Image: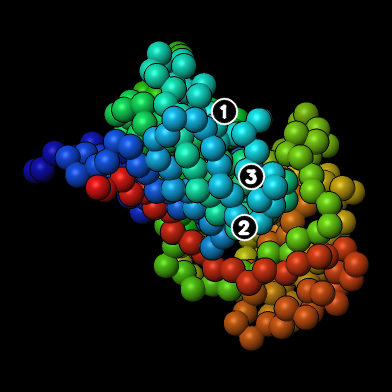
Amino acid sequence: MTDAPEPRAVEGRATLDRLSQEQSEADPDRLRLTLPATSANLGPGFDSLGLALSLFLTIEASAAEIFSIDASGREAHLTSTLDDNLILTTYREILERHQRPVRPLSLRLHNEIPLGMGCGSSAAALCAGVLLANHFGQLGWTMEQILNEAAHREGHPDNVAACFLGGLTASKTGPAVPKASEGLSTAALSFGAELEWRLLLALPHASLSTAKARQLLPDSYSRADAIHAVQSTALLVTAFALDRPDLLWTATDDRLHQPYRTAVCPLLRSLLPLSGRDGVYSVTLSGAGPSVLLIVQKSFSADLVWAAAGQEVTEVLELSIAGGARISSKR
């Protein structure tokens, strides 16, 4: 009889474990990051499921004499600011907390992720800040420690887990060890990055903060709604595992958050009737909204999204499921 393998809290396709094994080749003054957008919840998987999307935040960081950001891509006028920059704030706070020198950085940044649209822009920024602090502060953190830090700062693990690991990620925050009375840790598993499913991301005109979207939710739910959520989420994960997009129309049916957010996410109200019809497998809010994610057949025409949404939509992006974070610090 062989010994059982050690349990792992984090499993996925991110390259961080390989990076930690290549420290002899690493350049302590440089780091390149590519971090995907993410869509959390997917209907009933509230605060637990996340899907990596093929939009990316790419950062080339190097040690410098002063902090600077050279930004390009989507909303560069916002991502280039040094004040209240989530990447740099995260980087500074972690190093100061661990009493490490805060080395100024020069960042070359290219962003494809919509801001304030429920596409994981804050999760990507948090992950970037944690990874930069780990590298330039020489903290030597494991993947579990990095994910825990990012999830703690985000307040929920779904987006950051998907950003690190890619594919469909299921995650949970709980005791670090069995029966522990204190200390929390995030467990996360990822699969499905190889699925060749076609995704459409519909963007409205106005953004929506996650904090405002959470204020719309009730304090408690009925037993019937709780059972419905468990059933739907179990079917949703299985549909991804077995490559069964035909079940997504029922597996993504949600009673926990989408009904309460429709008033501030009118794009969902316009597009939700498409779910399960005419080549549309599913329609869900992307995270807390206001963007909407559709999983569709290859032959589906995006023109139908424009027709159904009317003036509520400003962009429809063609996407696919993405892998996880790509990290390089080789000389």
Q: Which residue is mark 2?
A: 73
State the image quarter where residue 154 is shown.
Answer: top right
Q: Are marks 1 and 2 in contact (CB under 8 Å)?
A: no
Q: Residues within 10 Å of mark 3 (few under 14, many from 20)?
A: many
Q: Amino acid at mark 1?
A: Thr
* Label 1 neighbour load within 10 Å: few <14, some 14-19, many 20+: some
Check disc 3 and report its element: helix, strand or loop: helix
Q: Earlier in the sequence, mark 1 or mark 2?
A: 2
Which residue in the protein does label 1 denote? 89
Question: Of 24 and 181, which appears nearest the observer?
Answer: 24
Location of residue 274 by image quarter: bottom right
Q: Secondary structure at mark 1?
A: helix
Q: Residue at x 44, y 48 (%)?
A: 60
* Left or right of residue 190: residue 302: right
Answer few, some or many: residues within 10 Å of disc 2's Cα (few below 14, many 20 plus, some between 14 and 19): some
Q: Which mark is residue 79?
A: 3
